[in-house]
Amino acid sequence: MPKPLTDQEKRKQISVRGLAGDRNVATKRDYYFALANTVRDHLVGRWIRTQQHYYEKDPKRVYYLSLEFYMGRTLQNTMVNLALENACDEAIYQLGLDMEELQDIEEDAGLGNGGLGRLAACFLDSMASLGLAAYGYGIRYEFGIFNQKIVNGWQVEEADDWLRYGNPWEKARPEYMRPVHFYGRVEHTPEGVKWVDTQVVLALPYDTPIPGYRNNVVNTMRLWSAKAPCDFNLKDFNVGGYIQAVLDRNLAENISRVLYPNDNFFEGKELRLKQEYFVVAATLQDIIRRFKSSKFGSTEVVRVDLSTLPEKVAIQLNDTHPAMAIPELMRILVDTEHLTWEKAWDICTRTCAYTNHTVLPEALERWPTDLLQNLLPRHLEIIYEINRRHLERIAKLYPGDDDRLRRMSLVEEGHQKKINMAHLCIVGSHAVNGVARIHSDILKATLFKDFYEVDPDKFQNKTNGITPRRWLVMCNPGLAEVIAERIGDDYIRDLDQLKKLLEFVDDDSLICDIAKIKQENKLKFSAYLEEQYKVKINPNSMFDVQVKRIHEYKRQLLNCLHIITLYNRIKKEPNKDWTPRTIMIGGKAAPGYHTAKLIIRLITAIGEIVNNDPVVGDRLKVIFLENYKVTLAERIIPASDLSEQISTAGTEASGTGNMKFMLNGALTIGTMDGANVEMAEEAGEENLFIFGMRVEDVEAMDKSGYDAMEYYNRIPELKQAMDQIAGGFFSPDQHDLFKDIVNMLLHHDRFKVFADYEAYIKCQDKVSALYRNPKEWTKKVIYNIASCGKFSSDRTISQYAREIWGMEPSLEKIPAPDDPRQ
């Protein structure tokens, strides 16, 4: 029975009815907007009060700077965090409407590529839930990550026009518009340095409320949109060029037009550098305005002394994308506020901190100096000065070690001079962190070894986490409820309490309940799949899922080789009692990444053969999940049995999908990479399916040399699978369709797929065997769920707050808007 409604909830219900209006003319979309605006009403009072609270208390504020915020949908998350779900469900039911249908009208806010952008979104949820005065700053892309269509087995991209029908969750704030400068030249005058003759673009902020979990805190995500100034291109007395000048406003406004769709890959384009500086310049003006105007327990109108900035402001750089914050802050302090370099540098380094997200060399940002010279000439001067002083310090510590100076320089000499943005971030920050213990160790031992030797105290680890609000309570209410029945619902804000489930690991009623919820989720997802993709699947088969961006290092190809091996085994012994599997692979390939697109084509080709073979029947199905995004993750993860986390050891910095599967009752097959290592440590290695080379083995093989042909010639099932791919078995109309993949795997595979093939197949055999014993399988599931506490983003953010930002998280509620003020 739904809970009885309070008077306030009844009033809201009536207002939904009022907004809904005449049933005959209102569309489903009208009802969605009516509901969204009703829920939004419950946010604004708390939002205003929270910001008022910060203004009065003047706490230290943290600014999370990111070029990506992969938010997904907002409606249901807001209802969960504000405890409005029951009231809204009831109101919508009374109107004869279907809540799920209305929720499906909302577009995902797809302002990110994958892990890095989704991490930022989870962090915003945790920062609000922990009562931190936090702000997410980024770009309001008009077009987010592309929509993926599969046409004749190939990925085709479509623009993501997510704002087409408007966004009820954002509020434009034109009163806080800021100018951002580009190009121009630098003048050194007796009064100081001036950056002149610049082109101006205006940054228009849009604010989105970020509600904490049932604590009445509502923080702000502020995304900047680019606007041309009114006099754009008109001040150059180009007589008669008025129409063209107005049309050219588009050039300025292109800055916030579209998200670059690369994951773990650097594309050194001018427009991307403009985006990076645009968000940084607008944000820093905002930070300093807020710092100067905050009330701080005295009657003084504004702060003038910027030396206390690090006591009141923390800036976290989400990868090197916002690295220009360091020279920009120096420019403001030295050129505008007229501080000495030494004082400015002290403020800058104590304020900024940097999170590294990858060790892959192709992902590291290295901007050509000629591009910077043209676009941001003053910033390049400042970077050179930072580098001069940095190298002076290193030369004192290591006299005569010229090679070390070259390695540690911010400037990479060569055919084309480049600025190494990671080096800039390390030198300009007081803390540098990796995102899982193994990743942080690799940074200290390899990529940043020289810097670690000089400043060991600067380097930290902050293992990633996920928000249990979206990734359990919201996407898997059945499981959340079964857990709450055993241990109460306090675990939602303190995920470590899941440990209490260990008392129930042999409890038949819990084992039964957890298996039942999984089966219901699988049935629901099967129905969704049938409706969306017109494919019928066996809900009693094992749901074996690999969803993530398509990349060679994530080794979707290893998964493909297992599928082909399984297929060949069933064909060879069709009468054997095989464990049935539905293998689902989903993810987007960067539009310019040829190999990744070909991998998608291989997956769809394998599916065409396997799924239409009558001998195989429903014992093996292969599905490519089209257009994987946050909302699809929320459907598939609760329905998964097996989570594939099979990157080459040492390549996946952390992974966060791995944690979502673990929390939702899937078992993991994976390498000792990223956070998998800590997952195995928490749950017990015997409760995961760990296989393959460790980091040390990969390093040893790099030294001795990896010979793919040796494996190909030694392992008959591997040879058979490769010969089928190469010989056109999966591409009968074009036998050499996959020649580039075959050639790569045999002759230049950086990620050593064949080296882990045998161990992977053996491990998958163990998975199949255990799946036939549902009780033992479910016991392992319970061990996994009970060991998830560490992987809450609440824990991650508490560590950032205490160990990097110098802030104290709190689980206190602040007064609701209708409570009398203290």
Image (spheres, helix red, strand yellow):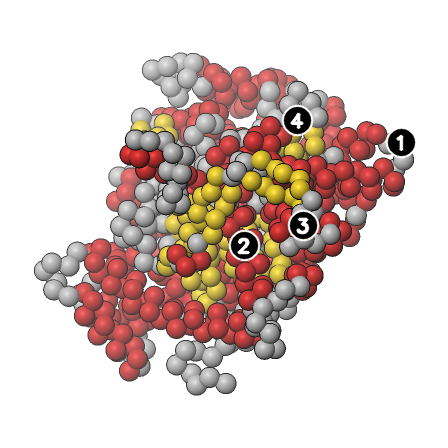
Q: Which mark is residue 598?
A: none
Query: Element under label 1?
Result: loop
Give the Cα separation between the discs numbered 1 and 4.
23 Å
Q: Residue furthest left?
A: 24
Disc 3 packing (10 Å; few <14; some 14–19; many ≥20): many
From what the image shows, is residue 222 above or below residue 546?
below
- Give the foreground label among 2 and 4: 2
Amino acid type, residue under disc 3 in the picture: Val
- Left or right: 381 in relation to 762: right
Give the Cα separation between the discs numbered 2 and 4.
30 Å
Amino acid type, residue under disc 1 in the picture: Gly
Residue drawn at x 34%, y 35% as measured from the top left = 245
Is the Cβ of the residue at disc 2 closer than 8 Å to that at disc 1? Answer: no
Q: Please name the residue that numbered disc 3 is placed on.
A: 334
Amino acid type, residue under disc 2 in the picture: Gln
Residue 359's quadrant in the figure?
A: top right
Q: Please name the residue that numbered disc 4 is placed on.
A: 417
Q: Earlier in the sequence, mark 4 or mark 3?
A: 3
Disc 2 packing (10 Å; few <14; some 14–19; many ≥20): some
Residue drawn at x 51%, y 39% as measured from the top left = 198
Q: Please name the residue that numbered disc 1 is placed on.
A: 400
Residue drawn at x 47%, y 16% as measured from the top left = 739
From what the image shows, is residue 508 above or below residue 710?
below
Q: Can you see residue 331?
A: yes
Q: Which mark is residue 285?
A: 2
**Relative image position of residue 529 (x, y in whole percent):** 31, 44
**Relative image position of residue 352 (x, y in whole percent):** 65, 53
How many discs mark residues in the rendered view?
Answer: 4
Query: Element under label 3?
Result: helix
Q: Nearer the viewer, residue 171 or 811?
A: 171
